[in-house]
Image: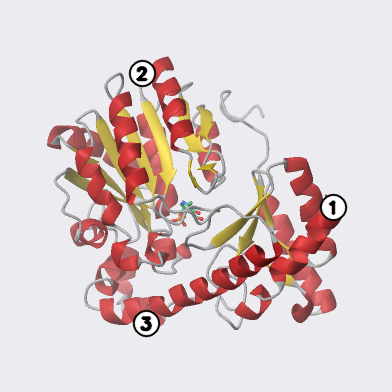
Amino acid sequence: MRFVKKEVNTTPIEDTVFVIVERAQRAKQEIGEENVVDATIGSLYDEEGKLVALDSVFEPYDALPKEQKAKYAGSFTGNIGYRKQVYEWLLGNVSSTLAHSVIATPGGTGAVNITIEECLDKGETLVLPEIAWGSYRLMATMHNLNTKTYSLFDGDHFDIENFRSVCKEVSETQDKLVVIINDPCHNPTGYSLTKEEWKNVIEILNACAKKVPVVLLNDIAYIDYSYALAHSRDYMEQFNAISDHVMVVIAFSISKSLTSYGLRCGAAVILGQEQEDVRNVEIVFEKAARATWSNIANAAMDNFTFVTTENKEAFEKEKAYYIDLLEKRSSIFTKEADAVGLSYYPYKEGFFVTLRIEDNTMRDHFHEALMQEHIYTVKVNKGIRVAVCSLKTEKCKGLAKRMKAILDQVR
Ligand SMILES: Cc1ncc(COP(=O)(O)O)c(C=O)c1O
């Protein structure tokens, strides 16, 4: 490791998901697709087992002139029309009173990473949910940050007291608090905070902000698959109550919203009470963007603007079909799980349902035993993730019962 910088973690990424995906693929080839439950893939798949790529997104994209695809973006912060439309898409129906700016990023990943990297100094601590998308921790490691986690649930509600005590502790031990909340449609539990819970979160952050500046990083990667879609942004109105020592950064991703994972387009939406503070964050994010990815794919941004304005009706109609499908699949699984007493984290909406297995050693045994029966899932901290987003409806039927029987054997 002589050739890389000294202060970098050199342990290889353990891609646990890829290994299981491979195993599931192999099983399908060996014993036939019909005999395998593959709940590993975290993208939206249709009932024919094909990746969903919405026509309302890709027909206009394919029709774009090649020069538009070839061209650089209008600026390092993103095309003006795109930045305006991202704000409109997310906050257009929210009576936000906050100053704001939008920076185009490569997916939600870019927005989350730029915030972590530019808001915390080396050696500081990032606050995360204890069950979370794995990249948060990796990003923290890459920037030589520590992490501290808050527990997510107290029974079937958000564990507000633990959130309070973790935020308080960190704000007493360093001079900034940066906390990630992945909501709505939390990956991987499918929980969404209530309006009341959001109100409490803001109160807690305002209390911490009396001591130190606070950055709330709200990762909304799955928001456009919310079951109560028309109300999915209502909670953002609570942000109006942030103190002037709190900054909100919303990490938005068109990967999921437009089923365009490969186009690598997203945005960081910066919100604050003071225009000057928003501008200061924008300056740093713009420089980081220029230094890291330079600019975002011009055609991906332009296509988002077209799809969510002129093509909005067709897009929303097509997407609504898949939201219904997700709801159908998840409700089959959760209802059957309730019936057989298979415990899962409080699921409301989203791509995944996660079984509650708090002992990670037991989880490992269970995960392996499931694979012996050709049920392939992904391990997460204290749980087993079932990707209903890629699991055909028929495969959801009877699955909970089978899983419960296997769990009873390993217990
Ligand atoms: C919770 C969460 N946030 C953000 C992302 C970022 O996705 P992308 O960078 O493709 O937009 C993902 C992708 O899986 C995710 O699960």
Which residue position is annotated with label 3? Answer: 59
The answer to whether the residue labelled 3 contacts the one labelled 1, judged by CB atoms less than 8 Å apart, is no
Camera-near label (3 vs 1) is 1
Residue 410 disc label: 1
Disc 3 residue type (three-letter): Glu
Is residue 191 rendered to the left or right of residue 23?
left
Earlier in the chain: of badge 3 and badge 2, it is 3
Q: Residue at x 37, y 51 (%)?
A: 194
* Percent of width and height locating residue 367: 76, 54
Earlier in the chain: of badge 2 and badge 1, it is 2
Tell me: residue 295, above or below residue 217: below
Front in this rendered view, residue 323 or 215: 323
Disc 2 residue type (three-letter): Asp
Tell me: residue 106, above or below residue 140: below
Identify the coloring: secondary structure
Disc 1 residue type (three-letter): Val
Is residue 327 rendered to the left or right of residue 68?
right
Camera-near label (2 vs 1) is 1
Q: Is residue 364 visible?
A: yes
Is residue 129 rendered to the left or right of residue 287?
right
